[in-house]
Image (spheres, rainbow, N blue to C red):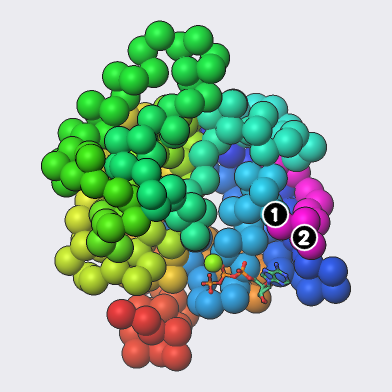
């Protein structure tokens, strides 16, 4: 594996007495796409929020999160963002009454405030990735289709030029054709050098695009390996790819 941009060790998170993630260990190599697959309630969102330092106030996390060689476990979320970590949350949190363009500009706000002169230039890169957003740049975010909203959420995250992009179920609620389109774009992000941690219930799509994968069950990492090996693992096939109980497509 290339040098890890993210290393998580013994990470546990809970909400009061509810243990949502227990002793999770995972790594994301620089420029890699790594996926965490798991069923509803497995702890996927909790894991991402714990890595980002953005658990709700009812939650708490313990353990090691090392990003770009620094232990960030005690850093506030703002500091992690400034350092290049970016999370597209399950609730996309777009500004519905603002245009596509203004939502994107907000994604670059931190770079603007930091005095980066070329912060606006990133928008053309985002439009090159998502031509549909360019066509709809003056449309209000609230009137976009589900797939376009997802594109905007990813595009807005990219405006911050992250080194680690974390995506919480980008396929959620989207038709298979749109899922393919979005995952194709995620795969293309590899060339920009950004590392992606992709949390998904859609194991089939996620394992196709990822280099490496982890399986999360009731808060524990129960399996991990190269994505193509996981896709052939009988347990994964049975529970996540076949006609098992977790099948969602
Ligand atoms: N704010 C909260 N307060 C209390 N319990 C919570 C909270 N958020 C999540 N949980 C619990 O933690 C566990 C893991 O939830 P989480 O949202 O991380 O799962 P998930 O894998 O993201 O599920 P989904 O695929 O449905 O998004 C669940 O049992 C859930 O009920
Ligand atoms: Mg979730």
Dot 1: what SS? loop
Indicate whether residue 58 is drawn in magenta: yes
Q: Residue at x 34, y 90 (%)?
A: 243
Q: Quadrant of the C terminus?
A: bottom left
Marking on residue 55 = 1
User: Where does the image place residue 67, in percent across and percent down from the top left?
Assistant: 62, 33
Count neighbours of disc 2 (C-alpha within 10 A) and say few if under 14, some if 14 to 19, many if 20 or more: some
**Dominant secondary structure of the magenta stretch?**
strand
The reply to whether the C-beta atoms of the residues labelled 2 and 1 are less than 8 Å apart is yes
Q: Nearer the viewer, residue 225 or 172?
A: 172
Asked whether, in this view, residue 233 is left or right of residue 152, the answer is: right
User: Where does the image place residue 32, in percent across and percent down from the top left?
Assistant: 41, 41
Q: Which residues are the magenta region?
A: 56-65
Q: Is mark 2 within 8 Å of ligand 1?
A: yes
Is residue 151 shown to the viewer in this render?
no
Dot 2: what SS? strand
Q: Is mark 1 within 8 Å of ligand 1?
A: yes
Count neighbours of disc 1 (C-alpha within 10 A) and say few if under 14, some if 14 to 19, many if 20 or more: many
Q: Quadrant of ligand 1?
A: bottom right
Indicate whether residue 209 is drawn in magenta: no
> Quick one: which residue is furthest to the right in this view?
17
Residue at image mark 2: 59
Q: Quadrant of residue 200?
A: bottom left
User: Where does the image place residue 44, in percent across and percent down from the top left?
Assistant: 57, 64
Asked whether, in this view, residue 17 is left or right of residue 192, the answer is: right
Q: Nearer the viewer, residue 193 or 110?
A: 110
Q: Residue at x 30, y 35 (%)?
A: 101
Q: CA distance from mark 2 to mark 1?
A: 6 Å
């Amino acid at each position: 594996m290339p040098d890890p941009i993210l290393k998580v060790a013994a990470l546990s998170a809970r909400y009061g007495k509810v243990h949502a993630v227990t002793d999770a260990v995972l790594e994301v190599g620089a420029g890699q796409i790594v996926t965490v697959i798991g069923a509803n309630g497995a702890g996927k969102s909790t894991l991402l929020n714990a890595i980002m330092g953005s658990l709700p106030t009812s939650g708490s996390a313990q353990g090691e999160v090392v990003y770009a060689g620094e232990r960030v476990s005690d850093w506030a979320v703002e500091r992690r963002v400034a350092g290049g970590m970016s999370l597209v949350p399950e609730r996309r949190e777009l500004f519905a009454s603002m245009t596509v363009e203004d939502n994107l500009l907000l994604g670059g706000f931190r770079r603007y405030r930091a005095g980066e002169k070329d912060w606006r230039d990133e928008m053309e890169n985002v439009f090159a990735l998502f031509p549909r957003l360019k066509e709809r740049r003056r449309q209000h975010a609230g009137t976009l289709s589900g797939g376009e909203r997802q594109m905007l959420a990813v595009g807005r995250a990219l405006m911050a030029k992250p080194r680690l992009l974390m995506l919480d179920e980008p396929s959620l609620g989207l038709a298979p054709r749109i899922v393919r389109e979005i995952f194709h774009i995620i795969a293309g992000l590899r060339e920009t050098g950004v590392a992606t941690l992709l949390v998904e219930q859609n194991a089939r799509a996620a394992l196709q695009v990822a280099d490496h994968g982890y399986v999360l069950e009731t808060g524990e990492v129960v399996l991990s390996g190269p994505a193509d090996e996981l896709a052939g693992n009988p347990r994964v096939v049975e529970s996540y790819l076949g006609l098992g109980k977790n099948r969602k497509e």
